[in-house]
Image (tube, rainbow, N blue to C red):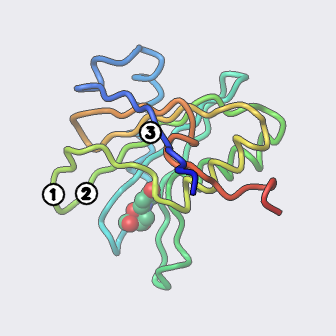
Amino acid sequence: MKPLTITSRLEVYESIDEISHDIQDLMKKAVEVRENAYAPYSRFKVGAAILLENGEVVVGSNQENASYPSGLCAERTAVYAAGAQHPNIRILKIAITARSLKHKVVSPVPPCGACRQALAEYEVKQEEPIELYFMGETGKVVKAESIKDLLPLAFDNSCL
Ligand code: THU
C-alpha cells in the first residue's frame, strides 16, 4: 500500500472589498445576472460570470424546469455559452454568487460536482487553469487557482 495524499490550496477573503478591482467587477456581473435566474422551484438564484482572454465576459444563471433534472446550474449555463460562442478563446476566470429568496446566504456557495466536472473539461481543453471565485450574497469570498483544487482526481480524457 502506498498512501496518496491530496492537497488543495484555497484562499479565503473576508469580503469582496478585499479582492482586486477586476474581480470585484466580474463578481458584480455575476450578481447582476443572478437576477435572471429562473428558479421558481428552489427559489435559489445563482449567477456566474466568465472572463475570457479577449476581455469579453460571458454570463449565466440557473434555469430550472418543472421536470427538475432538466434544469441547469448557472456555471454550466455560462461555461457552455462560452464554449458555444467563443470556442477558441481561453477562459481565464469565473465568478459565482448565489442568493436565496428564503434566507440570507452568508457563506460562500461552491459549484456543485457536475459543474466542477464541466469546468474541468474546459481546463483540459485549453490546457490552462481557470481561476474560480465564489461567494454567497455577502460575506467571505473563496478563490481557487484551478478547478483541480475543487475536483482532485478528476475523470478526464486521459482516463478514456
Ligand atoms: N445551482 C447552481 O446554479 N449552481 C450550483 O453549483 C449549485 C446549484 C442551482 C441549481 C438549482 O437551480 C438551484 O441552484 C438549487 O439547487
**First reached walking from the N terminus: tag 2 or tag 3:** 3
**Mark 3: secondary structure:** helix
At horizontal 70% and vertical 24% (from top left) the residue drawn is 53
Question: Could you say which quadrant of the image residue 92 lies in?
Answer: top right
**Mark 1: secondary structure:** loop
Q: Which residue is mark 1?
A: 103
Q: In this rendered view, identify the residue nearer to me: 114 or 44.
A: 114
Report the amino acid beneath label 2.
Ser
Q: Which residue is mark 3?
A: 30
Q: Mark 1 and mark 2 in contact (Cβ < 8 Å)? A: yes
In three-dimensional space, the C-alpha distance between marks 2 and 3, rounded to whole angstroms, equals 15 Å
Can see residue 93?
yes
Q: Is residue 44 above or below residue 35?
A: below
Q: Look at the numbered disc 3 and say if its residue's Cβ is closer than 8 Å to ligand 1.
A: no
At horizontal 54% and vertical 48% (from top left) the residue drawn is 4
Q: In this rendered view, identify the residue nearer to me: 50 or 148.
A: 148
What is the quadrant of the C terminus in the image?
A: bottom right
